[in-house]
């Protein structure tokens, strides 16, 4: 079973700054099954990136995903006030879904 | 517009059984391209996948919960259910149903709002 480790646990940044979130796997992943979610308090998580690099409908192009193998990254080029949230990576493999523990992006 | 809505008790006693239902509107659970999952989030913690059910009735559960989980479909009502037995306080969490789609690499594209379940005597 793949284990996903997200870092850092918390990222304290100011609006306008760049955010770089990491998702590292315990073994190689098929990029097609790597996704990222944005989760705000009291709301359902929202699919943000699928297939490692495809930004979902409704999200602006300041969000981008990249990576391969065991290392994947979510980048927010310039933080807007509405981007402060928790971000999870998730991987699907052989009828099993695994989430990372999340990275909280908070206002510095 | 596809929507998912969880329903069920908000408070359950230890050792009892939890049953939650997810009602799907705007899409048929008989669609072969979708998987229907349950996911939970313990207070202050991350997301934990519980299991999924396919339109055929095939199921797959998280190994850590497999012994206590059952999922089923009611296609006439376009619903699927989660049953979790032998509850303990450690099962206190927000339980969400979600749809995953092969087009998105089986990522969860639609989520319910979540149902807070507290296990307490």
Image (cartoon, coloured by chain):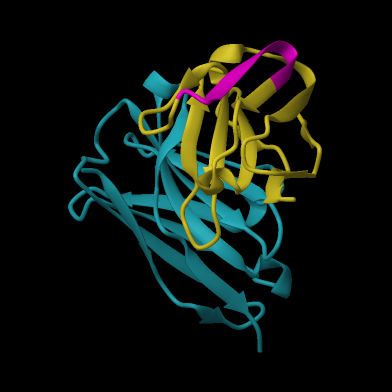
Q: Colour of chain B?
A: cyan
In this picture, residue B105 sits left or right of residue A67? left
How many dots with numbers? 0
Residue A40 lies, with reference to residue A3, above or below; the image says below
**Relative to the observer, which residue lies in front, A44 or B15?**
A44
**Relative to the observer, which residue lies in front, B111 or B120?**
B111
Is A44 a magenta residue?
Answer: no
Which residue shows up at 47% across the image and 26% down it?
B106
The percent coordinates of residue B39 (x first, y second) are 54, 50
* Observer able to see residue A25: yes
Quadrant for the C terminus of chain B, please.
bottom right
The percent coordinates of residue B43 (x first, y second) are 67, 65
Which residue shows up at 59% across the image and 37% down it?
A79
The percent coordinates of residue A11 (x first, y second) are 76, 42
The percent coordinates of residue B76 (x first, y second) are 18, 52
Boundaries of the magenta span: A61-72
* Observer able to see residue B16: no
**Relative to the observer, which residue lies in front, A39 or B22?**
A39
Residue A60 lies, with reference to residue A11, above or below; the image says above
In this picture, residue B85 sits left or right of residue B108? right
Q: Main SS type for the magenta part?
A: strand
Q: Colour of chain A?
A: yellow
Which residue shows up at 21% across the image and 40% down it?
B28
Which residue shows up at 61% across the image and 23% down it?
A93
Quadrant for the N terminus of chain B, please.
top left
Is A63 a magenta residue?
Answer: yes
In this picture, residue B27 sits left or right of residue A98? left
In this picture, residue B19 sits left or right of residue B94? left
């Amino acid at each position: 079973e793949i284990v996903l480790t997200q870092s850092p646990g918390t990222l304290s940044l100011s609006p306008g700054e760049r955010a770089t979130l990491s998702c590292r796997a315990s073994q190689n992943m098929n990029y097609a099954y790597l996704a990222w979610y944005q989760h705000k308090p009291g709301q359902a998580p929202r699919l943000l990136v699928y297939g490692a690099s495809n930004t979902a409908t409704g999200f602006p192009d300041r969000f981008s995903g990249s990576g391969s193998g065991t290392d994947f990254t979510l980048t927010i080029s310039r933080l807007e006030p509405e981007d402060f949230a928790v971000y999870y990576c998730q991987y699907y493999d052989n009828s099993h879904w695994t989430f990372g523990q999340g990275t909280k992006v908070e206002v510095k | 517009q596809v929507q998912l809505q969880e329903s069920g008790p908000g408070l359950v006693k230890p050792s009892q059984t939890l049953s939650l239902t997810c009602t799907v509107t705007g899409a048929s659970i008989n669609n072969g391209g979708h998987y229907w999952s349950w996911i939970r989030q313990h207070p202050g913690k991350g997301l934990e996948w519980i299991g999924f059910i396919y339109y055929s009735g095939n199921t797959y559960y998280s190994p850590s919960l497999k012994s206590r989980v059952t999922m089923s479909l009611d296609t006439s009502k376009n619903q699927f259910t989660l049953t979790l037995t032998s509850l303990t306080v450690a099962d206190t969490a927000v339980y969400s149903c979600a749809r995953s789609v092969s087009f998105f690499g089986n990522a969860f594209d639609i989520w319910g709002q979540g149902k807070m379940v507290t296990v307490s005597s």
